[in-house]
Structures are given as structure tokens and as C-alpha cells.
Image: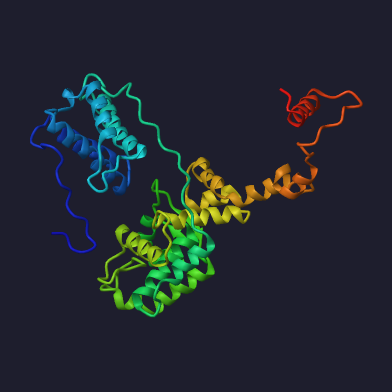
């Protein structure tokens, strides 16, 4: 049994005793991904998704890659679409369906290139469209409510406040928070070094004054009581002295969010979304936000420009004719300008446009009872 803070051993997928089986193919493919430098988080998630396909295939007598056809993958797609989750009886999102099929196609593309199968059964398979949803973000007031819900009279409360302040200030991912070491935080200069973030890339990010204050308080009053080994490099520790895991960060963020009465979806990532959105709303250039978040493509950052509505609203108010209350905008003004529809209209003394003629005729018929 793994100790606290250690990873549990991987459960085998498929029948590893069969050298031509799906289990061996997945194991070799996962090994290849590791040699390409993919993170354990990415590799582990890919392995989990492939495990779903292998289990599905074994239930239907498909145990080897050579037994998988285009029709097999298409049936798997249909099954995913019809599948209902045990908890809540909800269908899988299109994004989840896309991911599960995508890793299967990647597996068979690799098997084909490695000459382990003659034909790639997934060559012409169309993936489900990925849903394009705007991320939920917190208001400044909601962030303050969440942070204020933490009981900072306790040691663990001080630690949790430091964690959430760091999330909010830097926009870091939860795995980056977990990997944060003492040597990575320069409190004097206000800079944090994110080592081997997503894509295994290092980056430097600024950290705000308030977050620095809470980290200093945590280091001065709390961490020494949690650490079990003087050589422990991790900045944030659990009550057992182990480095924070992703589930620890998620549990803390979700608990304080609910305690504050904030019902928006998300836990750790909502702080990241919020940091990016609020910076853009306050005038930050998209390129700087991209650097802060560690996005490789600017397109990933630009989604926050769609959420940062304040600037768009200011432009709309300044430029759209109907955005301001003018002389004829209100109901009272509209009523004052309207002609009495019940009075017989005077015969026009001059030429009328087609629109004027239509309105005059409508009023005349209404007043005279004509048709």
C-alpha cells in the first residue's frame, strides 16, 4: 500500500500475458509517450482513457488490435454518446467523448506507424465536435468572500489562505501549485518560478503583495509545524507533512467557495480564469496574460477576452445609438411623440413617401371603420 503523498501502483490494463493483446499495445504506447517527454499527468490520463476502450472491447470479444475495425471504433463512439454516468444519470459531455475517442485514434495511428498493424482502422474517423463554452469567473467581491471565509486563526487556515492567495495572484494551475518549492518563490522581488509547467516549460510569473504577506506568515508560523523532514523542498504541505496533491488543492478551494456561498462551477481553475479576466478588464495586454498563464498559443488566452465584458460594455455604451437614454428613448417620450390613432387624420397637403402613405391609410381606416 502506498504511503500518504505517494502514487498508488498502476492497475494493469488488459491481458499483459498476450504479446499481441490490447493490454500489451497500450503498455508499449504509454512507454513511448513517456520517452517523448510527456508529463506523468498527461500520460496517466491517456492511460485511463485507453483503459475504458480496452474494457469496452473485452466485453465484446475484441481483445487484440488486429481485431479492431473502423466499425468497432464507430460503435464505441455511438456507445459513448448513449452512455449515462452512474452518478446523476447524465450523458458524457461532447468534450469527454472527444477525448476518449481521440486517444484511441492516437493509439492506432502509433501502432500503424510502428508496423504492428497493417491498416489503421481509425484513419478516417471523424471526432465529435468539442464544445466551446466560456469559463465561469468570479467577481472581485466573490473572491474576497471566499478568501474571507477561511479561518486564519488556525494554522491550516493560514496555509489555505496562502495557497488560495497564490492561485489568485499568479493564475497558476493546481499541479504547478503542488510542485512549487521553497526555492521557487522570491518574496523579496515578488517573482515565482514555475518549473516544468504544462508542456514541461519553465516560466517566471509575478506574485502580488497580498499573496506575499500570507506566504510569509505561513512560512513564519505554520510550515515548521507541518514539515517532517528538514530536507522537504515543497512549499505547501499537508497536515501529515507531505507535499500538496492536486486533490488537496481542489478540496480546499471548493470547500471555501461553498462556505462563502458562491455556487459557480469550478474550484482551482476558476481562480485562474478570474485572474486572467480581471487583468484584461483592467487593461492588460493579451500577450502579458498569455505569458502569465503559460499558454503556448495566443488563441488559448483570447477566450478570456470574450469573458471580459466590461470593456465591451463601455465601447457599446459609447458607440451604440440605443445604449444611451436620449430625447426619444423613454416610454414617456415615445408616448408624447405618437399621434392619436383614434382621431381622423387630416388629408395630406403634400406628397408622401410610401411609408408615410401606409401609416396615414392605416390611421384613416381605423378612425372611419373602413376596410
Describe the colour scheme in one phrase.
rainbow
Query: How many labels sit on residues?
Result: 0
Residue at 54%, 48% (x, y): give it: 307
Residue at 24%, 48% (x, y): give it: 87
Q: Nearer the viewer, residue 348 or 203?
A: 348
Residue at 47%, 61% (x, y): give it: 168
- Quarter of the figure that contains the N terminus: bottom left
- Residue 303 vs residue 39: left or right? right
Q: Is residue 253 above or below residue 215?
A: above
Q: Position of residue 86 (x, y in %)?
A: 22, 45
- Residue 24 vs residue 318: left or right? left
Residue at 22%, 19% (x, y): give it: 118
Q: Is residue 59 above or below residue 325?
A: above
Q: Residue lying farthest front? A: 369
Q: Position of residue 197 (x, y in %)?
A: 40, 51
Q: Nearer the viewer, residue 20 or 320?
A: 320
Q: Position of residue 137 (x, y in %)?
A: 48, 54
Q: Is residue 47 above or below residue 117?
A: below
Q: Quadrant of residue 61?
A: top left
- Residue 142 vs residue 59: left or right? right
Q: Residue lying farthest top? A: 118
Q: Residue lying farthest left? A: 17
Q: Quadrant of residue 259?
A: bottom left
Q: Nearer the viewer, residue 71 or 187?
A: 71
- Quarter of the figure that contains the C terminus: top right
Q: Position of residue 81 (x, y in %)?
A: 29, 33
Amino acid at each position: 500500500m502506498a504511503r500518504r503523498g505517494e502514487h498508488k501502483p498502476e492497475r494493469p490494463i488488459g491481458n499483459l500475458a498476450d504479446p499481441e493483446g490490447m493490454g500489451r499495445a497500450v503498455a508499449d504506447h504509454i512507454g513511448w509517450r513517456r520517452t517523448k517527454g510527456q508529463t506523468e499527468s498527461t500520460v496517466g490520463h491517456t492511460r485511463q482513457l485507453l483503459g475504458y476502450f480496452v474494457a469496452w472491447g473485452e466485453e465484446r470479444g475484441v481483445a487484440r488490435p488486429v481485431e479492431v475495425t473502423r466499425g468497432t471504433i464507430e460503435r464505441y463512439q455511438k456507445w459513448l454518446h448513449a452512455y449515462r454516468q452512474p452518478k446523476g444519470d447524465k450523458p458524457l459531455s461532447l468534450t469527454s467523448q472527444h477525448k476518449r475517442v481521440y486517444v484511441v485514434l492516437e493509439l492506432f495511428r502509433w501502432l500503424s506507424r510502428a508496423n504492428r498493424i497493417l491498416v489503421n482502422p481509425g484513419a478516417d474517423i471523424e471526432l465529435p465536435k468539442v464544445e466551446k463554452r466560456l469559463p465561469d469567473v468570479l467577481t472581485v467581491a466573490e473572491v474576497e468572500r471566499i478568501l474571507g471565509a477561511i479561518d486564519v486563526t488556525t494554522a491550516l487556515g493560514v496555509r489555505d489562505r496562502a495557497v488560495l492567495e497564490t492561485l489568485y495572484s499568479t493564475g497558476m494551475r493546481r499541479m504547478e501549485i503542488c510542485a512549487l518549492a521553497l526555492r521557487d518563490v522570491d518574496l523579496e522581488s515578488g517573482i515565482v518560478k514555475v518549473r516544468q509547467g504544462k508542456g514541461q516549460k519553465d516560466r517566471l510569473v509575478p506574485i502580488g503583495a497580498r499573496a506575499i504577506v500570507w506566504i510569509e506568515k505561513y512560512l513564519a508560523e505554520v510550515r515548521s509545524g507541518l514539515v517532517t523532514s528538514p530536507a522537504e523542498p515543497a512549499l505547501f504541505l499537508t497536515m501529515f507533512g507531505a507535499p500538496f496533491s492536486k486533490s488537496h488543492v481542489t478540496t480546499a478551494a471548493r470547500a471555501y467557495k461553498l462556505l462563502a456561498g458562491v455556487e459557480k462551477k469550478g474550484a482551482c481553475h476558476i481562480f485562474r480564469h478570474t485572474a486572467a479576466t480581471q487583468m484584461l478588464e483592467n487593461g492588460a495586454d493579451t500577450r502579458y496574460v498569455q505569458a502569465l498563464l503559460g499558454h503556448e498559443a495566443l488563441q488559448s488566452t483570447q477566450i478570456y477576452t470574450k469573458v471580459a465584458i466590461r470593456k465591451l460594455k463601455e465601447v457599446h455604451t459609447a458607440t451604440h445609438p440605443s445604449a444611451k437614454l436620449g430625447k426619444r428613448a423613454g416610454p414617456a417620450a415615445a408616448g408624447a411623440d405618437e399621434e392619436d390613432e383614434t382621431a381622423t387624420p387630416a388629408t395630406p397637403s403634400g406628397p408622401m413617401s410610401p411609408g408615410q402613405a401606409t401609416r396615414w391609410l392605416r390611421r384613416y381606416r381605423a378612425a372611419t371603420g373602413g376596410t
